[in-house]
Amino acid sequence: MASGNDIEKGQVNGSDSINAERGGINVGQLKFTLNTSLWEADSPLPFSCCIFRVPEVLRRRKVQAYEPDIVSIGPLHRSADPKFKLVEKVKEWYLKCLLERPTTTITLDSLIEGMKELEREARGRYSDPRNDLDQNDFIRMLILDGCFLIELFRKARDESRQDYDDPIFNAPCMLEYLYHDLLLLENQLPWSVLKYFYDLIESGNPGAEPLSKVVIDFFRDSVADPSIFSDRKSESTPEILHIVDLIRTSLVQEHKDEPDEDPKAAPLPSNHLPQRIPSAATLTEAGVTFRIPKEPKAGSPGGCILNITFKDGVFSIPPLAIDERTDPLFRNLMAYEQCYHSCTHKITSYAVLMDNLIDTAKDVDLLCEKGIVANWLSSEDASKFFNDLYDNTTVIDFVYKRLCTRVNDYHRSAWMRRTWIRWKNKLRSDYFDTPWSTISFFAAFVLLVLTFLQTVYTIQQYRHSPN
């Protein structure tokens, strides 16, 4: 119960005291608390956010697909975890080598001043800006992580830049771990930060490649088939947000949306998924043919892995190589599509369609025979990869709606075609396998017709004869 002193101080009034005595609420205190929290409230996900913590509903399906193994980039996994200790030392060593390079004009002062200008923007890119990191800690992180990444990409591109005692390039496993870690959604730096350091470091090199090409070339060795990545046509359009955004763009930028065959048809809801299509093995039994496009390479027109077509019973699917690295790549790309407001669900749509086509190891084997899937896993693991990939995701504007409708229409009419084919084959084998059997068939047919006509004539003659 409130004391008399509290009332005298104006903290509560008489009714508040009575409410407190009766086990009620202190209205004044509650109002003050709510006003304070509302005054400080802001959107937990500002429009500028593009680097997210993966939603728990996705993470719990396969935690290791979203967690870094040896390096933390950005604030979301910044910690004193011993597994990051080696690469944290490499970051400091790379920065030291950069500053001591004989030809460099870069100073620690210039790096700090540059990051002071970008620090506020960079924080706004994260769904969790780690406000426990003050400005000094955040800027230190941006400098160490950004310079490390740019030096890593440059060293990988030109072996002459690699130091004799560089642990990243002396231990073959290190690059494999880095490929995994640097393609995680939670392990990103804003592109503006990377671009600043790259332009600064390459300022004296007029022949320097665009940063986007340097990054894509680095990650070509991170996948079983490097041709799935296509070079960006422009450095500025659309805006690059981070490395995962760049990799996704390189996969989907050549995707061609199918034209609407019936513009008068009512559009389906954006979150509508059509009926599942049968598996590859079932469609093959219905007469569907699977093949790769004539120009399957990602760098050629129409070579994007998303450019899947179905016409006249022919499924045309660009090839995809899968191994143990494919799963975390696709999961993080799909997590990005699920979280970022300006991302179309193209990779997620691809995962849904491939899951439709692949139900069992038999479907994997069939697509492998056709050259559509290059599988470095077991057939069972490959089918499980596709079956589990898009669990708990949402698909908005599924890009294969019309294709699935055509496939299902074709499959529904397949039984009529199969019945006709079986009847035709049986007729050919039973009655037309030799010239004599063909002559006998037609002779019997003519005799049957003549007999029928004679019967009709006899009936007509009987009906019209006088009684």
Image: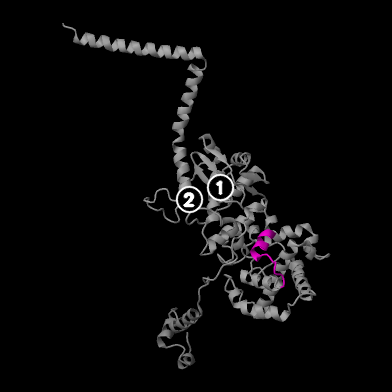
Where is mark 1, residue-wise?
A: 354
Q: Nearer the viewer, residue 461 or 338?
A: 461
- In the image, residue 207 lies in the stretch drawn in magenta: yes
Q: Is residue 226 magenta?
A: no
Q: Which residue range is magenta in the image?
A: 204-218
Question: Which residue has dot 2 on it?
Answer: 258
C-alpha span from label 2 to label 1: 18 Å
**10 with respect to 49 (left or right):** left
Horizontal side of residue 123 vs 165, given as left or right: left
Mark 2 / mark 1, whichever is N-terminal: 2
Instruction: Look at 70% across and 73% down and name the residue there.
Output: 203
Q: Is residue 276 above or below residue 166?
A: above
Residue lying farthest to the bottom in this orientation? 8
Residue 169 horizontal side relative to residue 378, left or right: right
Front residue of this view, candidates 397 and 127: 397
Up-down relation of residue 198 to residue 410 (above or below): below
**Amino acid type, callout 1:** Met
Helix, strand or loop at label 1? It is helix
Against 379, residue 421 (above or below) is above
Decide: is 358 above or below 197.
above
Place of residue 32 in the rendered image (x, y in percent of width and height, measured from the top left): 47, 83
Q: Position of residue 209 (x, y in %)?
A: 68, 64
Q: Determine crowd level at label 1: few under 14, some 14-19, many 20+ residues with C-alpha closer than 10 A.
A: some
Q: Colour scheme used in the picture? A: one colour
Is the C-beta separation of discs 2 and 1 under 8 Å? no
Extreme-right residue of the structure:
164
